[in-house]
Image: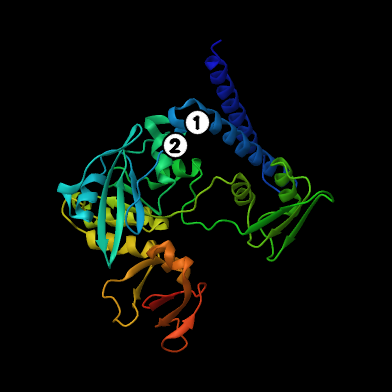
Amino acid sequence: MDLEPKKIIMAEEIEEQIKNIEEEIRNTPYNKSTEQHIGRLKAKIAKLKEKKEKREKGKSEGGGGYDIRKEGDATVALVGLPSVGKSTLLNKLTNAESEVADYHFTTLDVIPGIMEHNGAEIQLLDLPGLVEGASRGKGRGREILSVIRNVDLIIMIGDIYRSDISKIVEELRSHGIRLNQKPPDIKIEEKDKDGIKINTTVELNKIRKETAMDILREFGYVNANVVIRSDIDDQELIDFLSNNRVYPASFPIINKVDLVDEEDKKKLADDLEEHDPLFISAEEGEGIQKVKQRIFNELDFIRIFLRPQGEKADDEPMILKRGSTVNDVCKKLHSDFIENFRYARVWGPTAKFPKQKVGMDHELAEGDTVRIITK
């Protein structure tokens, strides 16, 4: 028996339910008396979208997943509408046009390149154009978005003719991608009885505990101890409970500024002020060095130097994310360093004195020098 028509109908029914709930939210004035009701409706939408996404993944070949062969110290996605200059920018940033080749991820072509800057090797991915409606599957949108979810930094690219970055932001947001946000600081421990108890370490100004409890119940929690450590709103709580959100860094670029005068450029800058864009001309090479430095800064890298026993410190830095520890150094070197670790010696900003003896959990900073001592 062919069950495919039934699946399609069910997917359509889910979409219709989502539209109806969204309409109800739009028609419900937001105030204290409606806050709980709206919170429950938002939670219902999140659950329906999750159900719809699972059905669509089940119908797609290979389960809808796309793997990226990651290289370098971080991976950056160039995301934008078709023909805004992503490929030209990739070639300018990597300075290696002859080495750019097509990599095929199931049904999706991604063009990679390696950018070297400040000692870091950063993988850039030029993705197919992201069209409006991508989060609903238009223009291979879900395949593109599945790649974007796994990168460290997203560069949203427009040009002077199509500079509406907010449309890209909305498509990413609809696929669970939260740009330049921190995950909510929440801890949940389920228990056998006594209902839901919420404790907070900060004052909640954006959501009432009653609303939070309703949302938790909508996600199936009946008995639980919940600790909230950040001033969240209802959507942030839903994001946390959905457990399928990602929180990459991002910034926008507006390309082809060589085609407008300073007055038009200033107007664009004013219109996009909240996004803090860079204005460049990839074709002319204008602003390329600023892009490289912005990428490095947004990835929040630090550079540390290794100092093998009996030798001088290496000239080439090791690139780590800010907040990394000696343990991260060992992991990056080889698993043997973790298994045979005794202690480390540190010189530099985080050392109380030169050659300080530290353990695995010692947090490092820009400019530190580290020696790993093994068994």
> Which residue is nearer to you in this view: 167 or 269?
167
Indicate the secondary structure of the residue bearing disc 2. Answer: loop
Horizontally, is 130 left or right of 86 in the view?
right
Instruction: Please name the residue shown 73% across and 45% down the image.
Output: 221
Residue position marked by numbered label 1 in the rendering: 57
Quadrant into which the N terminus falls: top right
The image position of residue 48, as x and y in percent, is 61, 33
**Can you say whether 60 is above or below 208 in the image?**
above
Residue at (60% x, 51% y) in the render = 236
Question: Could you classify mark 1 by the number of other residues whose Cα lies within 10 Å: few (under 14), some (14-19), or many (20 or more)?
Answer: some
Judge left or right: residue 160 versus residue 244: left
Considering every residue shown, the one lying at the far bottom of the view is: 353
Please state which amino acid type lies under the numbered disc 1: Lys
Query: Label 2, on which residue?
Result: 65
Residue type, label 2: Gly
User: Coloring scheme of the render?
Assistant: rainbow
The residue furthest front is 375
**Toward which corner of the image does residue 12 lie, by quadrant?**
top right
Secondary structure beneath dot 1 equals helix
- Residue 85 makes an appearance in the image: no
Q: Is residue 211 visible?
A: yes
**How many labels were placed on the picture?**
2
Residue 203's image quarter? bottom right
Q: Are marks 1 and 2 in contact (CB under 8 Å)?
A: yes
In which quadrant of the rendered image does the C terminus lie?
A: bottom left
Query: Residue 10, relative to residue 65: is it above or below?
Result: above
Query: Would residue 149 be found to the left or right of residue 308 on screen?
Result: right
Q: CA distance from mark 1 to mark 2?
A: 8 Å
Q: Residue at x 28, y 56 (%)?
A: 279
In this view, 316 is above or below 164: below
**Horizontal and vertical percent position of residue 248:** 45, 54
